[in-house]
Image (cartoon, helix red, strand yellow):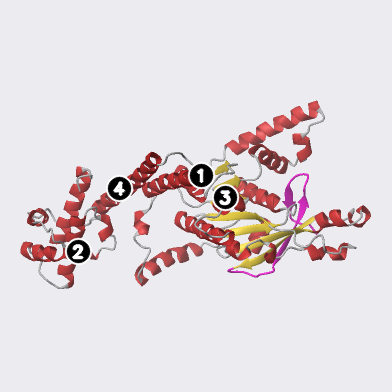
Amino acid sequence: MSNQSSVDNFSEKRLLQTLFYQPEFLDDKDVNEDIFSSLATRNIYKSLIALKDNAIPFTRDALLQEYAKVDLDASQAVVDVITEKQHEPLETIKDIIEQLNDAKKRRSAAAHLKAAIKKIEDVSHLNENNTETISKHISDAEASLKSDDSSSFKKVMNFEEWSEQYNKELNLRKMGKQFYFYNFMFDELIPDGPRPGEIGIIASSPGSGKSTLALNLVNSLIEVQVPSMYFSLEMSSIATMDRLLSKRLEVEYSSIINPSDQGHFEDLCSRINMEQKTLLENKKFRFSEDASMSIADLKSHIQKFQADLGQKYCIVVLDLLSMITDFTRTSGGANFAQSIEIGMNELSSVAKELGVHIIGVLQVNRGNESETKCYDVQDLAKFRPTRAQIKNANAWVERARYVVMTFREKMYAELFLEPEQHDTMLDIIECQVVKINNGKIGKISKGLFNSDFFSIDPIVI
């Protein structure tokens, strides 16, 4: 206990004294062995539990005898401190528990930071592996400081606690559906909405509209100011902003990146500046183009965002998911499929621990395009993607609550058919559910795809 502050020592002493003179508090669900910092105080706590379980009256001698059973170095002086004159009876021990939980978080954070410092001092040079280890220790230290101890003690619940947790959710449902994507395609396909603690996947072959779909989803969240984070790991920040502004201003992308008329471009710049002022008012959005990001980095970014917002829930979009460094290499003798599975398990844990909804974008193989015969419009359906085209599909999708794949017939028509066969075709994007835990597999939602504006709009009949 020498490394603790005097305040923390006093809190442990005060709690143990209260438990000795008011043993009814031993039944408090927030009192447990983990909140004590030393072997001595944990053993005193165990001894008090033993006295209560065996219906032995709480006396100094009885506690000393029980303490000697669990601790060979049992000190009579420690027992004397715990059993000294009783303070005024307490109506609640909430303030003591809060102080000890705070001390526990600080101890955990300090331990992780010490491990990071030791790693830094021990290595002869920094490489990718030990840098990641150091970053994880620092991330874990930050997570320790922000952890919600009131919930961490309830990871194993009895029926009373479980029912209490469930009934809170049940009462919220009386107000109707809680979670929305605010995107006409996703809200049609995913009945539960973007629930916290879950992962979804958007997948398709190159050029089929997956990134445009992700951009439209993010734009919808920006519009209604649902807390959201957009990690564009493949596309640069400038190109992504160009696309977002093209979508929001309904201005052709080419007019933004390759202006031909100077006067017209000055007007466009004025519109862009006004739109940026609108975006600046949104404090519930974060963006990153960090292509070297790990899951540990992602967790840290989310935690900082949550701290800035003062709330947990947000929607996190990762485009491309496969570019996160945990999925780009193998370690410990694992093959790529095993590494992906390990990474997805960790990502799922992050979603659950932080209470966020994560959507990952994946690119799939184009399959047997070179071998598929395509002579007319009817043959285009042969190119509709399947779950099997996702390389290491089982590893990717096992932890996902839903998987949506996109398909554009016109893209394939332009690749394989003569212009006169597709000139009048509408560019329709289909989003099909190929996996879902609560919903209908095979369900399709359609939208009008406009590559000039990076927009997907409802089809008006």
Q: Amino acid at mark 1?
A: Glu
Position of residue 382 relative to residue 347, above or below, is below
Give the quadrant of residue 433.
Answer: bottom right
Q: CA distance from mark 3 to mark 4?
A: 31 Å
x, y percent for residue 230:
59, 46
Q: Are marks 4 and 2 in contact (CB under 8 Å)?
A: no
How many labels sit on residues? Answer: 4
Indicate which label's residue lies in the foreground, 1 or 2.
1
Name the residue tied to disc 4. 107
Indicate which label's residue lies in the foreground, 3 or 2.
3
Name the residue tied to disc 3. 324
Q: Amino acid at mark 3?
A: Ile
Give the magenta part as a residue range.
437-461
Q: CA distance from mark 1 to mark 3?
A: 14 Å
x, y percent for residue 74:
12, 59
Which of the two labelled residues, at mark 1 and mark 4, occupies the earlier sequence position? 4
Which of the two labelled residues, at mark 1 and mark 3, occupies the earlier sequence position? 1
Res. 14 in view: yes
Position of residue 439 relative to residue 413, above or below, is below
Indicate which label's residue lies in the foreground, 1 or 4.
1
Q: Amino acid at mark 4?
A: Arg
Q: Which mark is residue 128?
A: 1
Residue depicted at x 57% and y 37%:
281
Q: Amino acid at mark 2?
A: Lys
Residue in the foreground of this view, choosing between 47 and 179: 47
Q: Quadrant of the C terminus?
A: bottom right
Which of the two labelled residues, at mark 1 and mark 2, occupies the earlier sequence position? 2
Residue depicted at x 89% and y 57%:
417
Give the quadrant of residue 255.
Answer: top right
- Does residue 438 show up magenta in the picture? yes
